[in-house]
Amino acid sequence: MSSPTFSSPATIFMFFCFFFINLPFSNSLLKSPLINATARRAPRQLSVNYYAKSCPQVESLVGSVTSNMFKEAPASGPATIRLFFHDCFVEGCDGSILISSKAGSKELAEKDAEDNKDIAKEAFEGINKAKAIVESKCPGVVSCADILAIATRNFVHLVGGPYYEVKKGRWDGKLSKASRVHQNLPQSNSTVDQLLKLFSSKGLTSEDLVVLSGAHTIGFAHCKQFVNRIYNYKGTKKPDPYMDPSVTDLESY
Ligand code: HEM
């Protein structure tokens, strides 16, 4: 394969799709005890036509929801893409980020972890709506993990990226632990070495890290994620010297 160019959001998203489609099968993830618990169910071979007989309309059903969501709440696009990423990096793309915490349980579910609290609620709402419609036509057939993968692809396309086929057949994970989230996700103050180590632990390369970071072409970040780097880097009351001055020089705005 020739060397990829990263000149357009379309290219970035193509790589994004490729990696997350393959991520559930990376060796490093399969070694995890939590994944092994899920894998005790008969393994499934993912395929584009997985639901051809059992739910042939799954793509159009999910598509009707994502198109509406994008019109009514465009923020659901980037939020869903981030939701999928945060699902995939914590024990694989198994939909476990969608599971709610059990009332009275000591252990919160992934979605209630601090790192997931800022994912816009529209992302969860969209997946819930899509699941409800799919269930009404094909009860008990399509996994939430597949619905999240299809919806993410739809939003990638809706925000201007390419359309690609989604392989389906993922099992839904049954374990969802908030305590597994933080160490499996990158942080806004992670160093490059830390990011490389984390991505490498998921079977991803430095090139993957660069390409996937291109997902930030869209969406927003809360002020708390970067305000120190502008006003008070490491207690200096000055901006982070490594940041482009055109970003930190607020007088130029
Ligand atoms: C490489 C390391 C990464 C770091 C350090 C990182 C960090 C962040 C942070 C701090 C935010 C802002 C969250 C907020 O304030 O609510 C954010 C947003 C976002 N991230 Fe990442 N992220 C990384 C990788 C990725 C990847 C691999 C994807 C998907 C392929 C992704 C997709 C997104 C999207 C779409 C948003 C915008 C969400 C929205 O507008 O609702 N990120 N990320």
Image: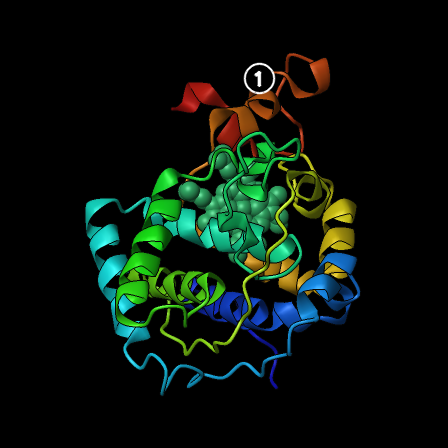
Most foreground residue, 140 or 127: 140
User: Label 1 sits on what residue type?
Assistant: Tyr
Which one is nearer the viewer's eye here, 73 or 127? 127
Q: In this view, does 200 lie above or below 252?
A: below
Q: Where is residue 54 in the image (x, y as percent from the top left)?
A: 37, 82
Q: Residue at x 48, y 78 (%)?
A: 167
In the image, residue 157 lies at what x, y percent?
33, 66
In the image, residue 153 lies at what x, y percent?
Answer: 40, 66
Residue 61, horizontal then vertical, whole percent? 26, 68
Corner quadrant of residue 114: top right
Residue toward you, 158 or 45: 45
Q: Which quarter of the rendered picture does the C terminus lie within?
A: top left
Mark 1, Cα crowd under 10 Å, few <14 / some 14-19 / many 20+, is: some
| Quarter assignment of residue 45 | bottom right
Above/below status of 147 relative to 226: below
Residue located at (72% from left, 62% from top): 37
